[in-house]
Image: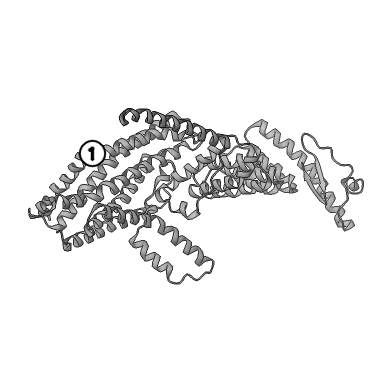
Amino acid sequence: MFNSIQRLWPLAWIIFLDGLRRHAILGLLILAFALELSGFLFMDFIGHDIGRASSDFLFSILWIVGAFFLFFHAVQVISWDEEQGVIYALLSRAISRSEYVIGVFFGLTLLLLFLQLIIGIVALISLYVIQSQLDPVYFPLLFPSHFILAWLGLFMMQWVVLSVVVLFSGLVRGGFPVFILSLSFYFICSGLPVVREHLLRQQEMGIDTGFSPQIFKFLSALFPDFSRLDFKNSVVSLDIGMDNLDMFLNFGMSAVYVVLVTFLACKLYGRRDLY
Amino acid sequence: MNKRSLAWPFFVAVVVLYAFLFNHVDRVKEQGGHDLQPLAPKAFYDATGYFKQLSAEILFIKTKLFLGSDPNADRRQKNMPVLSAYFKQVAVMHPLLSDTYYMAESALAWVSPDYAIRANEILKIGIQSHKGAYFLPFFMGFNYFYHLQEPEEGAKWLKRASEYEGSPKWFAHFASILTARGGNISGGLVWLRMMLSTADDENEKQRYVGDIAEYEKAMLVLEAIEDYKAKKKRAPKKLEDLVPEFLEALPPMAGHFSLDYHQGKLSLR
């Protein structure tokens, strides 16, 4: 295992450096800072709950920037290696296909972590600056521990999407199909809880829904409900809105999901025809 | 003249034409005023996922922009149903955003009793999520008392507001007055006595003592009415009918209190 790590770590590092070289991170950081500046204009429209609105806005920026990274950079990494022939050079150096997939995944994880860390730190500092300029009634509470929890929740969501991007990259050729599949995955994850809730209400009203609730429950296992990792509201609130056990279970379940999907990605890529 | 020498004048002419058309279209749009666009289907907002709170805040800003454009009475009336729907959607999507409730209360409750009811529906969403925000039940209580003419219902919500940590002390006092105004004089009296027992400030105690004295006078009249009903098997037509058999004289009410007797029900105004 240690030998595997020794082999895939240079690949992960190459992916990380390549992302920096392509200015993926630089461009996204500039976008993030520009959006954060525009936030000060946005805050002018909120008369009372400025702390909450600021926190929502900054975390939404974190999500937008992460989504741009995932859907415009990460979806193309494996297809670039295939198109440019780099994949053959890598696989000829006694690195297995599984190690290649894991290496790419960890490289992209490093990039995502780097991006989100920088923007996250700036976001937290921004919140403190905003709070210091306002009367306490407009921004009474700010908990750095809850901010970190919300940041971790967001990172975990994006990590799940990243694992699915890598899975689709191993499944189909070309960046654009991977982009479409990954975006569809995200929209299904967002829309499925709404459908499930609708079915639940119908059941409560006594309407026969057949096997639909069970089917959608199974689908929810495949397309996770990201709202379980959304702790944005807790940043300026006393409680996190969930008990600790539920919170750990949600994070644990997401981590297991990432492991499963990455394993599947490795197996699929191992069987794929690269020519 | 060759084509190259015509190119730049042509470009300048097109720019001027565009500027003229833009100016005209923009002026027409500004004069027309802004109506609120109807909301998208509910499922659209439910599926906004991680952007739910930001989407709610953007919808809220749209209501602020509409109200801030100072629409005339006709345009405001025309957009009221949509405005009410916007506030409700924002409250459902982001129940923790306080601004929604302040804005809904100021924009809706004063329009008509029907819109006061809608404002209360929106406030109820906030009360379920916003633990400890005393202004929400206070607004509800005020709406019931002032806009809907239901002082007893108003008193219930004000009492609830008074139980929230940090709420102003006069909430409870106001609730007791509304209770009596709704016809529940004995309930209001019990409450006032409880507030007197827990008051620290001397001025506050004196105010409660004064109010209790007035409530006790009203209680005498109430007891006289009950005695009248027991003997004559009907309620008196007016308070003066109680004198002198059941009451020596109608007690003079001091301060801002007055007895109000209507259709067999005594209340303290």
Q: Nearer the viewer, residue A75 or B30?
A: B30
Which of the 4 quarters of the picture holds residue A217? bottom left
Outermost left residue: A93
Q: Nearer the viewer, residue B22 or B164?
A: B22
Q: Position of residue B107 (x, y in %)?
A: 61, 40
In the visual, does A25 lie left or right of B79? left
Identified at 23% across, 60% down, the residue is A171
Residue placed under numbered mark 1 in the picture: A23
In the visual, does B33 lie left or right of A232? right
- The quadrant of the rendering that contains the N terminus of chain A is bottom left
Which chain does tag 1 point to?
Answer: A
- The quadrant of the rendering that contains the C terminus of chain A is bottom left
Q: Position of residue A59 (x, y in %)?
A: 37, 42
Outermost front residue: B1
Kind of residue at badge 1: His
Q: How many marks?
A: 1
Identified at 28% across, 47% down, the residue is A72
- Say which element carries label 1: loop
Which of the 4 quarters of the picture holds residue B232? bottom right
Q: Nearer the viewer, residue A207 or B170?
A: A207
Q: Is residue A220 visible?
A: yes
Q: Nearer the viewer, residue B135 or A117?
A: A117
Up/down of B5 relative to A262, above or below: above
Q: Position of residue A89 (x, y in %)?
A: 9, 51
Q: Is residue B162 visible?
A: no
- Label 1 neighbourhood size at 10 Å, few (<14), some (14-19), many (20+)? few
Up/down of A226 relative to A61, above or below: below
